[in-house]
Image (cartoon, rainbow, N blue to C red):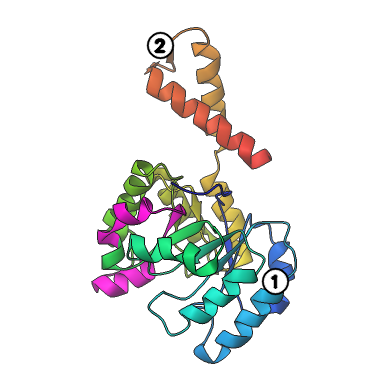
Amino acid sequence: MSLEFFCPVAPLFVPGNKPELFDKARKSGADALILDLEDAVAPSDKASARTAVLAHEKSPVPVIIRINSSRSAWFEDDISVLKTCRCDAVMLPKAESRAEIERLSELTGRPLPVIALIESASGLASLSSIAGASGVAGLAFGALDLALDLDCQPDWDAMLMARSALVLAARLAGLPGPLDGVTPNVVQMDITHSEAAKARALGFRGKMAIHPKQIEPILKAMLPTPEEIAWATSVIDITSGSGVARLDGAMIDAPLIVRARRILAARSLAKA
């Protein structure tokens, strides 16, 4: 069972050791910030990153802290940050077991929602257990690390099975659609949009960004298009008071009516 937590669509990673970027990130249009203590921070900068994260100002959008893996040398120091820092959730990288997730609340002394970042073969094999762990608010996908662990290419085809597994595990655990992993290319925004659109088609409901320029293409891909909204509106209009109807030559029955309602609900959330 997950704790109540706003599930972001386009959260932005910000290196924890660069507090000069925090305010810019808050104004970037991202619907959540991920203050990073892990991959974006060199070992020599871990201490200064923890200090900066502890001191960060109140944010108008939710703040997620990505700590280091529970098997890393920095985990215990990161836990000390979580005990008192201003944040809305914690992201656990290389999540591999239910036990390490459920231990977080015990260690921090506070019930922080957990986003479990799946980026290893062990994590993928334990998906159902991880998704069902107490305190898990959502799943996120780390394609680059998983490809490294599996010794395969981090491209779409090679990662398709893993992405589909995350969507299935999230659904079975009653969690929202997962967050897709980052797009390393921060120059060609069409790549970010294309990858986000494909992830959304699979059942992902958000995608993590590593550059402010990626936020707009992610939001455009993840939120309903004008065409989808028009279709959903027509479906609701013609099926009002009826369980089955026909639209543009296609039969509209219960599953499509539910899909139409979800599209319109997603539009309403985007306007909120």
Query: What is the secondary structure assignment of the residue under circle 2?
Result: loop
Q: Are marks 1 and 2 in contact (CB under 8 Å)?
A: no
As rendered, which of 139 and 216 lies closer to the eye?
A: 139
Q: Amino acid at mark 1?
A: Phe
- Residue, far top: 241
Q: In x, y percent, where is residue 87?
A: 63, 63
x 72%, y 68%: residue: 24
Residue that protrudes farthest toward the bottom in the picture: 44
* Up/down of 86 relative to 264, above or below: below
Which quarter of the figure has residue 15?
bottom right
The image shows residue 55 at horizontal and vertical percentages of 71, 75
Would you call the spot at circle 1 few (<14 residues within 10 Å), some (14-19), or many (20 or more)?
Answer: many
**Which amino acid lies under the numbered mark 2 shown in the image of this protein?**
Val
- Residue in the picture at 61% in, 55% down: 216
Span highlighted in magenta in the image = 124-153
**Helix, strand, or loop for circle 1?**
helix
Q: Residue at image x 61%, y 77%?
A: 16
| Residue marked by disc 1 | 22
Q: Which residue is label 2 attached to?
A: 244
Q: Earlier in the sequence, mark 1 or mark 2?
A: 1
Is residue 74 placed above or below 244 in the rendered structure? below
- The C terminus lies in which quarter of the figure? top right
x%, y% of residue 29?
A: 68, 57
Query: Vertical placement of 15 versus 194: above or below?
Result: below
Q: Is residue 12 magenta?
A: no
